[in-house]
Image: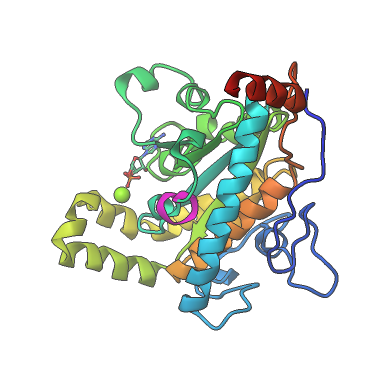
């Protein structure tokens, strides 16, 4: 059993131990970047702004990112410890965004300090023959994080209303029903899982630059596929499909955050902040011993040592 005890107070600009914004201090990034209720027009949503960042630029953000990384690591360890003690909770970070938006980079920069034992990362590619034979959520359910773990989805079930819709891989009457199916799935999921969905929002121009950077650097060729340019050509269709996702699947229990991602340093910083803020809302504590007493055990150990 887990008995709440005086919890570690981890200080970070403007956020108290229970995840609430403190008076007069910086607002929560989770509030600033939360997708609005109702229709979304991505063209009016900034890709290169830096909402809520009070520092002077990249160097400041990277310094803060390091301490945020330590906080994510500590909170994850508490989540893990509670999982061991029988708590069924976990967190799922869903990353969506156009190619080069930085979905993979988040794992390195935001979760790089976390004990690998506590993270399950999965990248969803084009479904295999076996996966295609099942319901579109089948492969997703198999990759959900167990208790105590932070799961990271690099792409997700949302591809089934994004690429599938843009390329008409199934008839419209089929994909159009999926928003409701996803909402019901995520509502069930949220009873045990803190669902955090980040849309990494880049501009078409920024993607063009990043694709070019991939072509210019042999170390980045492994990330490139000629098909990436065909997707780039369908930019507007994807933006509309994303706007629908943000509008139709944005429940309070499984919210979307729209992260301006043209500046990599802001993207990493903002996702770190969201993660820390959301972990804090879980009221994590260090579990107290069940079935043994530290005093008794200390006395036993002393006896063994003489
Ligand atoms: P990447 O993330 O760059 O390695 O590329 C993975 C590719 O798999 C992308 O082009 C996705 O659109 C594609 N993909 C992921 N999920 C699906 C899906 N459910 N149906 C079709 N293509 C998908
Ligand atoms: Mg790719």
User: What residue is rendered at 27% in x and 53% in y?
Assistant: 228
User: What residue is rendered at 82% in x and 36% in y?
Assistant: 4
Q: Position of residue 55 (x, y in %)?
A: 59, 79
The secondary structure that most of the magenta stretch takes on is: helix
Q: Is residue 243 visible?
A: no
Above or below for 246 versus 193: below
Above or below for 146 versus 155: above
Q: Is residue 188 left or right of residue 174?
A: right
Q: Position of residue 60 (x, y in %)?
A: 52, 76
Does the stretch in magenta take in 109? yes
Q: Which residues are magenta?
A: 107-112
Q: Is residue 247 left or right of residue 226?
A: right
Q: Is residue 261 left or right of residue 10?
A: left
Q: In terms of image quadrants, where is residue 56?
A: bottom right
Residue farthest toward the front in the current orientation of the protein:
306
Q: Position of residue 219 (x, y in %)?
A: 17, 58
Nearest the eye: 125 or 13: 13
Does the stretch in magenta take in 32? no
Nearest the eye: 29 or 188: 29
Q: Position of residue 10 (x, y in %)?
A: 70, 57
User: What residue is rendered at 31% in x and 21% in y?
Assistant: 129
User: What residue is rendered at 65% in x and 45% in y?
Assistant: 248
**Looking at the rendering, in which quadrant would you find the N terminus?**
top right
Q: In terms of image quadrants, where is residue 39?
A: bottom right
């Amino acid at each position: 059993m887990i008995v709440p005890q005086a919890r570690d107070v981890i200080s970070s600009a403007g956020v108290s131990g229970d995840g609430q914004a403190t008076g007069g201090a910086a607002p929560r990034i989770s509030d600033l970047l939360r997708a609005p209720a109702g229709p979304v027009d991505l063209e009016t949503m900034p890709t290169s702004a830096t909402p809520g960042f009070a520092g002077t630029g990249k160097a400041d953000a990277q310094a803060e990112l390091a301490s945020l990384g330590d906080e994510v690591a500590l909170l994850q360890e508490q989540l893990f410890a509670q999982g061991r003690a029988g708590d069924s909770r976990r967190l799922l970070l869903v990353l969506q965004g156009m190619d080069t938006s930085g979905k993979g980079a988040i794992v390195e920069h935001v979760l790089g300090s976390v004990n690998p034992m506590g993270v399950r990362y999965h990248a969803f590619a084009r479904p295999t023959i076996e996966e295609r034979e099942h319901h579109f959520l089948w492969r997703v359910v198999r990759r959900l994080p167990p208790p105590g773990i932070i799961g990271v989805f690099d792409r997700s079930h949302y591809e089934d209303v994004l690429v599938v819709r843009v390329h008409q891989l199934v008839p419209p009457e089929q994909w159009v029903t999926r928003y409701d199916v996803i909402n019901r799935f995520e509502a069930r999921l949220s009873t045990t899982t803190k669902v955090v969905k980040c849309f990494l929002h880049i501009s078409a121009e920024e993607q063009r630059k990043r694709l070019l950077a991939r072509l210019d650097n042999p170390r980045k060729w492994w990330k490139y596929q000629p098909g990436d340019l065909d997707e780039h050509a369908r930019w507007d269709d994807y933006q509309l499909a994303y706007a629908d996702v943000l509008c139709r699947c944005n429940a309070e229990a499984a919210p979307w955050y729209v992260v301006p991602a043209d500046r990599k340093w802001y993207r990493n910083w903002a996702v770190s902040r969201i993660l820390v803020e959301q972990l804090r809302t879980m009221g994590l504590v260090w579990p107290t011993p069940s079935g043994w007493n530290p005093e008794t055990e200390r006395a036993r150990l002393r006896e063994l040592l003489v």
